[in-house]
């Protein structure tokens, strides 16, 4: 089972920038909920090569800063981006631009629906997100990425899976 923890890096590229990073652990013995690291992301990636470390877009309004971070860390096989589609939809930038700009770094996607105003983590298909836009972007730019249905409860996860099946996205 994969566990997710969050890390806040206090330093990056010699600047003080808090970056929230979701770790997708391949070793289920880790049980840490949050870690504050004073060391560089590069050192963390090197020292934890058995752990995939993905940066998730959280509050950014466009993909350009996170893309620069990804470029700088892309030499590490255990590094990638987690594109939260709902966060991208709520930003000031069209989510297709997020997919186009970050395509070579995205290894994982968080998927849920919302009302286009608040990150409500609704079941996929029960909000206002343009599902066809996601499907087109996934097929064109992101098809190698894994997907996590990120909803609040199990019934919403099941409803999301049904919607994905009804839309022909999964079989």
Image: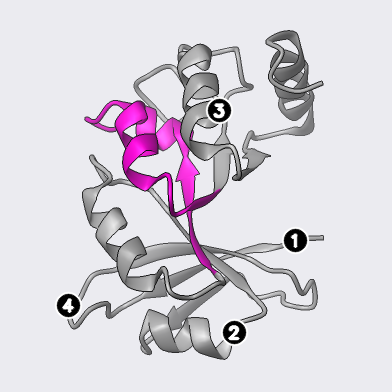
- Alpha carbon separation for disc pair 2 and 1: 15 Å
Few, some or many residues within 10 Å of mark 4 (<14, 14–19, 20+): few
Residue at image coords 59%, 45%: 145
List the residue tagged with mark 4.
15
Q: Earlier in the sequence, mark 1 or mark 4?
A: 1
Residue 169 drawn at (x, y percent) = 69, 19
List the residue tagged with mark 2.
48
Q: Which residues are magenta?
A: 79-107
Residue at image coords 37%, 19%: 116
Residue 14 drawn at (x, y percent) = 18, 83
Q: Is residue 121 visible?
A: no
Mark 4–mark 2 CB contact (< 8 Å): no
Q: Which mark is residue 139?
A: 3
- Of circles 2 and 3, which is in front? 3
Q: Is residue 20 above or below residue 124?
A: below
Q: How is the image coloured?
A: one colour
Q: Which mark is residue 2?
A: 1
Q: Secondary structure at mark 1?
A: loop
- Of circles 2 and 1, which is in front? 2
Q: Earlier in the sequence, mark 2 or mark 3?
A: 2
Foreground: 86 or 66? 66
- Alpha carbon separation for disc pair 4 and 2: 23 Å
- Alpha carbon separation for disc pair 3 and 4: 36 Å
- Is 33 left, or right, of 156 in this rendering? left
Residue 34 drawn at (x, y percent) = 54, 72
């Amino acid at each position: 089972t994969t566990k997710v923890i969050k890390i806040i890096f206090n330093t990056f590229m010699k600047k003080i920038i808090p970056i929230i990073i979701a770790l997708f652990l391949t070793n289920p013995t880790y049980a840490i909920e949050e870690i504050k690291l004073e060391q560089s992301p590069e050192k963390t990636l090197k020292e934890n090569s058995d752990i995939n470390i993905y940066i998730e877009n959280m509050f950014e309004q466009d993909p350009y800063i996170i893309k620069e971070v990804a470029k700088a860390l892309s030499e590490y096989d255990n590094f990638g981006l987690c594109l939260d589609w709902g966060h991208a939809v709520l930003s000031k930038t069209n989510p297709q631009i997020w997919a186009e700009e970050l395509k070579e770094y995205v290894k994982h996607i968080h998927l849920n629906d919302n009302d286009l105003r608040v990150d409500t983590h609704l079941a996929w298909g029960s909000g206002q997100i343009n599902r066809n836009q996601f499907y087109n972007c996934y097929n064109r730019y992101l098809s190698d990425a894994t997907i996590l249905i990120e909803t609040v409860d199990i019934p919403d996860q099941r409803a999301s899976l049904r919607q994905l099946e009804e839309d022909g996205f999964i079989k």
